[in-house]
Image (spheres, helix red, strand yellow):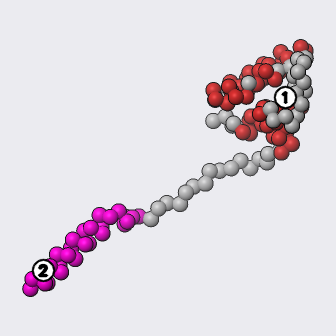
Amino acid sequence: MIRCTVAVSLLLISSVWLAASGSYVPRPPRKLVKAERSTAEIDPERYGLGRALVLRTGEVRIPNDVNPSLRAGQEARLRTVEAGLSAEVRQKAQLTSLAGRLTPPQLEAVIYYLGVRFPAP
């Protein structure tokens, strides 16, 4: 009789201990929903050129002299793009220092790169 009582007590204690261990999940975990990716393809040439110019990797030579006729227009466009970036990215990129030093295709590549890399929310 005592053995039976001890056995039942141990069985009850062990079942309570197992239930409290946290290994039981009342419902199966949900599948993660993948974020929808844009169906638009990225142009690797423009993206690479813009990346090289923004990060100043040295792959593309940026002239030291500023073209005064291009400076005002480029500075306005770069400030507009810069306004949509976070403070950290804005500080690292220093886009206004590129104003007047880029050719029109280079400017478009910089804007394209920033638009793809840091999309507006």
Residue 48, image x, y percentages: 83, 41
In front: 65, or 12? 65
On screen, residue 40 above or below 11 = above
Which mark identifies residue 107?
A: 1
Name the residue located 86 percent from the left edge and 37 percent from the top edge.
Answer: 59
The residue stretch that appears in magenta:
1-27
Alpha carbon of mark 2 to alpha carbon of mark 1: how far?
Answer: 84 Å
Q: Residue 8: within the magenta?
A: yes
Question: Where does the N terminus fall, quadrant-wise?
Answer: bottom left
Residue 77, image x, y percentages: 78, 23
Which mark identifies residue 36?
A: none
On screen, residue 92 above or below 51 = above
Name the residue located 86 percent from the left edge and 42 percent from the top edge.
Answer: 45
The secondary structure type at the circle numbered 2 is: helix
User: Can you name the residue that lies furthest to the front here?
Assistant: 58
* Few, some or many residues within 10 Å of mark 1 (<14, 14–19, 20+): many
Answer yes or no: is residue 112 visible: no
Q: In this view, does 11 lie to the left or right of 108?
A: left
Dominant secondary structure (helix, strand or loop) of the stretch shown in magenta: helix
Residue with the mark numbered 2: 5
